[in-house]
Amino acid sequence: MRIEWWILLMVYIAATVILAFIPKNKIRLAVVALLFKQFITFLAGLAVVELGLLEYPIRLFPSINRTSFTYEYYALPAVCAAFNVWYPNGRSRVFQISYYAGFVSVLTIVEVLIEKYTALINYIHWEWYITWVSLCLSFYISRLFCKWFFQDANA
């Protein structure tokens, strides 16, 4: 088995572990964040691939979709669910911005390493900073949606 398939398997395991540690009282928030992030990544991921900005040479379901099912529909939404569940509501604005920057930076670094050393993703007309900005924006939009959706519950 190629290293890329092992990486995909490890991503599924890691994302499942992340979801397994969601506290019971925050499951509704996690589900809303996960589903909303899937909606965002469905639209953005298809647009990016169809515009030829990047490609996923090795992926699940290659005859159905040219995006990465693993990343766009499971791993990134799972991380977004965790991001929203453990968001530091009562902390300072600087801490909250650092929270965004930390999540987005780790995801971007991992993507750049995967792009450089594997055949899971190829940047065509794409750079790491586009990933960083788009992730930051999508996490912010998902946070706004969750706050709106649970406005009476102080999400």
Image: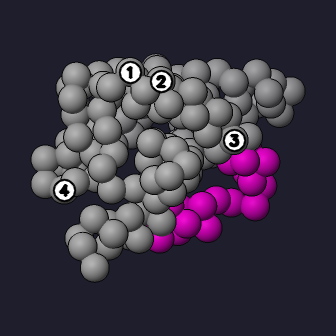
Give percent across and percent down for residue 25.
78, 55
> Which residue has dot 3 on it?
35
Dot 4 or dot 2: first in sequence order is 2
Residue depicted at x 80% and y 30% = 150
Q: Relative to residue 131, is residue 152 drawn left or right?
A: right
Q: Position of residue 42 (x, y in %)?
A: 57, 34
Quadrant occupied by the C terminus? top right
Three-letter code for the amino acid on which mark 3 is drawn:
Leu
Q: Secondary structure at mark 1?
A: loop
Mark 3, secondary structure of its residue: helix
Name the mark on residue 148.
Answer: none
The reply to whether the magenta stretch includes residue 28 is yes
**Tag 2 residue:** 47
> In the drawing, does residue 144 fall left or right of residue 62?
right
Mark 1 vs mark 3: which is more N-terminal?
Answer: 3
- Above or below, 119 against 99 in this view is below
Residue neighbourhood size for the residue with mark 1, other residues' Cα within 10 Å, grouped as few (<14), some (14–19), many (≥20): few
Q: Nearer the viewer, residue 130 or 89?
A: 130
Residue 124, percent from left and from top: 21, 29
How would you rate the neighbour count of disc 2 (Cα within 10 Å): few for under 14, some for 14-19, many for 20 or more? few
Q: Which residues are magenta?
A: 13-31
Residue shown at 46% from the left, 59% from the top: 60
